[in-house]
Image (cartoon, rainbow, N blue to C red):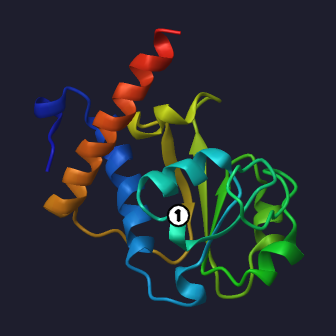
Amino acid sequence: MLSSTETGKSLPVMKQLMFVLLLLLFAGAASGSEGRIVSQSPYITDTLCALGLANRIAGVSRYGDLDLPKTGGVIDSDPAAIAALHPGSLFLSDWTSRDVCKRVRPAGAKCVVLQKEGYECPVRIPEGDYQIVRLDGLHFVSPSPKILEGLADLQWQFGSRNKKNESK
């Protein structure tokens, strides 16, 4: 496990680990609706794809650029469109109110609301800008070496993209 002395940044590393752990829990989900994901934020969708979960995404917000069914906006999600996709997991931004979350979540689906610190380019995600705000029905496990390796790979990939963006 990475310590604050190894990284110099314990809080961002812990945020990253928690987010990656959460997403990897979904990566191992069974087939059927349990493994289907609806993402109501383009930033969350980008992260899911970067973690190799694109094949589980069943629907995205109208702002998503994947060729998948659209499920409304970030703050005005369409409950009927979401329910029609039978997702096992629904990822929402903290811009979505708690009432909307309750209204749009299909029965049996896990609802995960993530908070974004600021409104920046999605390449900032692995640097710890996302943190978990609310989590319904999931439990965290100790990170395995594979998870830590995946996190290091994401940091490298997105760090390279950040340098390209900063040079523009």
Q: Name the outermost residue toward the front.
A: 67
Q: In this rendered view, identify the residue nearer to me: 53 or 24.
A: 53
Q: Is residue 70 above or below residue 110?
A: above
The image quarter containing residue 30 is: bottom left
Q: Is residue 154 above or below residue 107?
A: above
Q: Residue at x 74, y 80 (%)?
A: 85
Could you tell me residue 112's position as x and y percent?
A: 59, 64
- Residue 73 relative to residue 152: left or right: right
Q: Residue at x 36, y 45 (%)?
A: 16
Q: In this rendered view, identify the residue nearer to me: 58 or 92.
A: 58
Residue 11 seen in the figure? no
Judged from the image, the secondary structure of the residue bearing numbered disc 1 is: helix
Could you tell me residue 123's position as x and y percent?
A: 49, 33
The image quarter containing residue 68 is: bottom right
How many marks can you see?
Answer: 1
- Residue 153 relative to residue 47: left or right: left
Q: Residue at x 48, y 32 (%)?
A: 124
Mark 1 surroundings: few (<14), some (14-19) or many (≥20) residues within 10 A:
some
The amino acid pointed to by label 1 is: Ala
Residue 119 seen in the figure? yes
Q: Is residue 166 above or below residue 99?
A: above
Could you tell me residue 110's position as x and y percent?
A: 60, 76
* Residue at which label 1 appears: 54
